[in-house]
Image: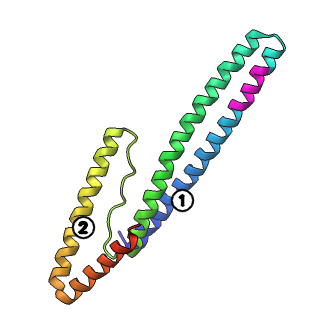
Amino acid sequence: MSAYTIRREYRNALAAAIAAEDWWWREAHHQRQETQRWQQRIELAERSGDPDLATEAARRARHHAAQARSAELTYAEQRTRVRMLKDEARVQAGATVTRPIPQLPAQDPLEQRFAALERETVVDAQLQELKARMASTGPAVATAAQEAGRAKEGGSQT
């Protein structure tokens, strides 16, 4: 698979993730508005002396509140996916070696923990490979790279 094809796949995956993130934000907003609307209807039914209507309005308000919470959670997960894809796209843009597209994190918390562990293992292996390549290119290149890494680490601390 060519580097161009991989970059195109990342762009497409990122565009789809951003679109989904936007949709879930709008859905959460819509469900919050519906919750407020039904809350107002509860008050109206109570003021008019219709307890059955108020009860039904309360049921609808709870339903929309639950839908809003669910959409907000999904939005947060999607936002995390977008960040992951953006980070990976940045890595791919600077990479000369093609790598497979990472899988998005699973919804199950246990799956997410294993996915994070697997990513750490891959990153550690890539770091070891890079260190080995730097060591084989000579001390001048390795020293310059180590100094650049130290400068970056020192600049990112706050």
Q: Please determine whether, in this image, residue 89 is positioned above or below residue 144.
A: above
Q: Residues within 10 Å of mark 2 (few under 14, many from 20)?
A: few
Q: Nearer the viewer, mark 1 or mark 2?
A: 2
Residue at screen point 23% across, 62% down: 124
SS assignment at label 1: helix
Residue 125 falls left or right of residue 36: left
Q: Please determine whether, in this image, residue 65 is positioned above or below residue 151.
A: above
Q: Is residue 8 magenta?
A: no
Residue at screen point 55% across, 55% down: 18
Q: Please determine whether, in this image, residue 100 is positioned above or below residue 109.
A: below
User: Furthest-bottom residue in view?
Assistant: 140
Amino acid type shown at disc 1: Ala
Which span is picked out in magenta? 35-43
Residue at screen point 23% across, 74% down: 130
Q: Are marks 1 and 2 in contact (CB under 8 Å)?
A: no
Residue 8, percent across and down?
47, 67
Q: Which mark is residue 15?
A: 1
Residue 111, percent across and down?
32, 42
Residue 78 falls left or right of residue 39: left
Q: Quadrant of residue 154?
A: bottom left
Q: Majority secondary structure of the magenta segment?
A: helix
- Which residue is tagged 2? 126
